[in-house]
Image: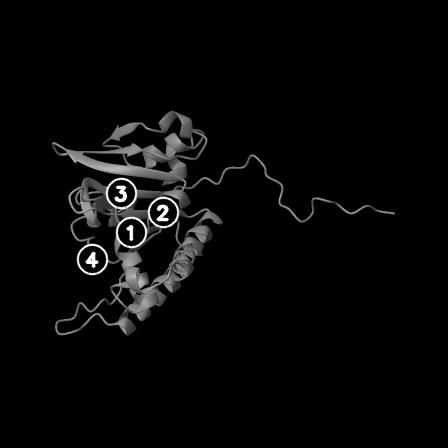
Amino acid sequence: MVKSNPWSRYVKADETNKQRIIAASFGEVGTGKTTFWLGAPGPIVVQTLDQGLEGVVEPFAKDKDIYVAGYDLGQTPGAEFTHALAVEARDKFVEDFEHAIGHARTIVWDRESDMFPLFSFAEFGTDDAFAAAPPKDWDKLKGKIRRLIAMAKATDVNLGIIQGMKNEWVSKVNPKTGKTAAIQSGIRIPSGMESIDALVHISLEHTRSNGRFSFTVGKSRGPGSREIQDQTFEDIDFKTFAMLVFPDSSSQDWE
């Protein structure tokens, strides 16, 4: 009698690394986030919601194929950003991403900080969704975004998730009145879905000082991750960074 394999229901882990970068890039305006990701290998699909590629994409477009997916958010004079328009834009964003997964080598969300409010408005039909929607509905919305990131993880596609920054709000008790109120903490934090850093393999905080661009590596996964975690790199491009994450790779692997 042939015994069945008791482990057949599982997938056995191995030492194979997928040679691609799935990362969140966050930072203030003008800190080089988009420029960094346009240095990734092509074909690149940029899903843009802030129409911010002008003056940045042109040098890269000379050397590689870059395709831009834009979305109608009521930009036409006299138009209005309605719930119906949000649903249409959200659905097109998902369709474009699913198509790009099968054809592109790199996908960039520019910016997820704008994507998340779009998905929220499409899901709930209100700008005041934090008050209108219960936690279970927010979990459902976030699940839709987690699904997209999981799709990228199942492939060899690079995924760059760009986030802007916002003021942090915290609850504080007024010692005179005993009432709790929301105040700004004075700290700047990534804007968008708050759990993005838990979903990606690498997080990069981009900064600019005296005309020099740099980023600091936070969370990092990959063969070279221990050497680059918590390190700051100045004026290096995507290709150079990718070879630090994957030390056995070559420049040609990231062309």
Q: Position of residue 144 (x, y in %)?
A: 41, 59
Q: Quick one: label 4, few (<14), some, or many (20+) residues within 10 Å?
A: few
> In screen coordinates, is 210 left or right of 201?
left
Q: Position of residue 216 (x, y in %)?
A: 28, 32
Question: Circle 3 sits on which residue?
Answer: 26
Which of the marked residues, 3 or 4, is nearer the chain's N terminus? 3
Q: Amino acid at mark 1?
A: Gly
Q: Amino acid at mark 4?
A: Gln
Q: Secondary structure at mark 3?
A: strand
* Residue positioned 29% across, 44% down in the render: 37
In whole angstroms, how far apart are the C-alphas of marks 4 and 2? 22 Å
* Residue positioned 62% across, 41% down in the render: 12
Hey, which quadrant is residue 122 in on the image?
Answer: bottom left
Question: Circle 1 sits on which residue?
Answer: 192
Q: Position of residue 237 (x, y in %)?
A: 28, 36
In whole angstroms, how far apart are the C-alphas of marks 2 and 3? 11 Å
Q: Secondary structure at mark 2?
A: helix
Q: Are marks 1 and 3 in contact (CB under 8 Å)?
A: no
Question: Circle 4 sits on which residue?
Answer: 51
Q: Quick one: label 3, few (<14), some, or many (20+) residues within 10 Å?
A: many
Q: Position of residue 10 (x, y in %)?
A: 64, 46
Q: Nearer the viewer, residue 155 or 151?
A: 151
- Front label number (4 vs 1): 1
* Residue at the front extreme of this rendering: 177
Which of the marked residues, 4 or 2, is nearer the chain's N terminus? 4
Q: Secondary structure at mark 1?
A: loop
Question: Circle 2 sits on which residue?
Answer: 196
Q: Are marks 1 and 2 in contact (CB under 8 Å)?
A: yes
Q: What colour-coding does the image apply? A: one colour
- Front label number (3 vs 4): 3
Q: Amino acid at mark 2?
A: Ile
- Figure quadrant of the C terminus: top left
